Image (tube, rainbow, N blue to C red):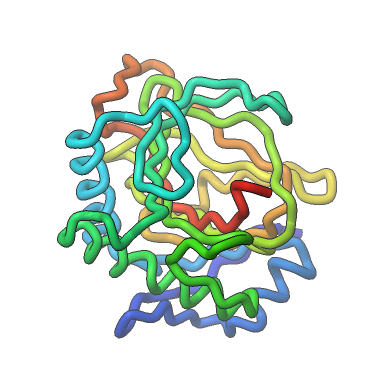
Amino acid sequence: MSRVVETPAALRDGLIATAMSRDEIAERVMERGELVILKQAFTDETVTGVRTAVADWGRQVAAAELDDFTGNYHRRRVHVARIQQAPHVFHDYNFNDLAAVPDELQRTLRGFFEPLRELYNALTANEVRFEIPASGPYVHPQLIHYPSGGGFFARHWHNLEPQKLGFIVSMAKRGRDFRNGGTCFEIDGDVVDTEAHQEIGDILVWRYDHPHWVTQSDLKDKFDWTSDAGRWVATFAYFDPKG
């Protein structure tokens, strides 16, 4: 039995329309433990535009040494996670305060992440907004770049609550922007590799407590933090950094 289910999708009038009902998507992900891929939810042109705009912003802003959970920042990470002992090499771009982002980039990010926010709320019955509350969890847009030459993230996992389910949006085209690398999951003892299933513009919807890892990008290439080559994804993180 395949754990991966693919269904057509498209961005229409600011909403992500899906051939499969939203109730069925949520049921397959949360109750059956399936990975649902919303195929071609975004066009190549759209995601490439978002990726390029974010990378350009990162070249104008110095990389942070520490996380800033109330601001907008990017960080180059070469670490072993303290609690889960998961080594990782990647470059993440985080937008906790969209109102403070330059106008053109803010429009680009909102045009991309607002449809994801609406879909997420519909699938989870949450009512998240792009704002920081006085207390409790909040959501922020994030792009992650796994640079060619060895970007990866070893096996790790998250608490199910409050996120419930996650999105991984493919932001790069295999064969053009990168050659190899993808996200793998362990579900009920089975390893599920999504590399061959997810293409640029697809949204992978998954239950948030599945153990998962990201395989290495193009090891034969020279690693270069300043290059945009490699695999890019967008995620939708909902958590309380103080909790």
The residue depicted at 42 percent of the width and 77 percent of the height is 16
Dividing the picture into quadrants, the one containing residue 26 is bottom right
Using the image, determine if residue 179 lies above or below residue 157: above
Q: Position of residue 232 (x, y in %)?
A: 38, 43
Estimate the x, y position of residue 190 in percent, counting from the top left.
78, 45
Q: Is residue 112 visible?
A: yes
Q: Quadrant of residue 144?
A: top left
For residue 20, above or below residue 241: below
Residue shown at 50%/82% (left/top)?
19
Q: Residue at x 48, y 53 (%)?
A: 235
Q: In which quadrant of the rendered image does the N terminus lie?
A: bottom right
Q: Residue furthest right?
A: 188
User: Along the line of sight, which residue is nearer the eye, 42 or 118?
Assistant: 118
* 130 relative position to 164: left or right: left
Residue at figure coordinates x 31%, y 23% from the top left: 225
Question: Is residue 111 rendered to the left or right of residue 189?
Answer: left
